Amino acid sequence: ALADPAFIKDYKALQEFIDHPTTVDGICRSVVKSIRQALEGYLRMKYPNQFSNNEWLGDMIGKMRVATAGSVLSMGNGLLTDLTQVNDYSAPYYHGQQEGEAFDQVELTSYVRQALSIIHR
């Protein structure tokens, strides 16, 4: 299957942040959104037809968590801890709850690396 262009864009934004770190607030906020969007795109490609277009990262994690043993989604159980950690970090930023808070560059870089490691498995 061909990769979704939106996934490629978000993936490249993550890689660009790793290659050229910045503390510019607007870029950091964009990177946090790209973390979630890249993971959502990745999960939609990895598990086609398992998630609807209106299911987001938290919904996907929930579905994977309750997947029946042996089902397609149960094969992603090894990703759940990392996905949950990234979701917990990025959700408040994504939903605008952290407006005006400065980014911790080390923390953001760590979560970008974690998201990329999920995609590269």
Image (spheres, rainbow, N blue to C red):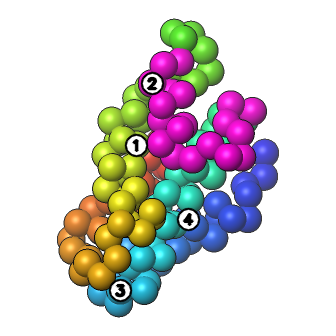
Taking the image as shown, residue 42 lies to the left or right of residue 2, namely left
Between residue 64 and residue 119, name the one nearer to us. Answer: 64
Pointer 4 and pointer 3: residues touching (CB < 8 Å)?
Answer: no
State the CA–CA distance, disc 1 to disc 4: 16 Å
Residue 63 in magenta? Answer: yes
Mark 2 element type:
helix
The percent coordinates of residue 77 (x first, y second) are 44, 25
Residues rendered magenta in the picture? 49-67
Q: Which one is earlier in the sequence, the residue at label 1 or at label 4?
A: 4
Label drawn at residue 110: none
Residue 113 showing in the rendered view: no
Residue occupying the point 52% across, 74% down: 13
Label drawn at residue 65: 2
**What residue is pinned by disc 1?**
83
Residue occupying the point 45% across, 24% down: 65
Decide: few, some or many residues near mark 4? Use Cα within 10 Å; few <14, some 14-19, many ≥20: many
Q: Which one is earlier in the sequence, the residue at label 2 or at label 1?
A: 2
Tell me which amino acid carries mark 3.
Asp
Q: Which one is earlier in the sequence, the residue at label 2 or at label 3?
A: 3
**What residue is pinned by disc 4?**
11
Tell me which amino acid carries mark 1.
Leu
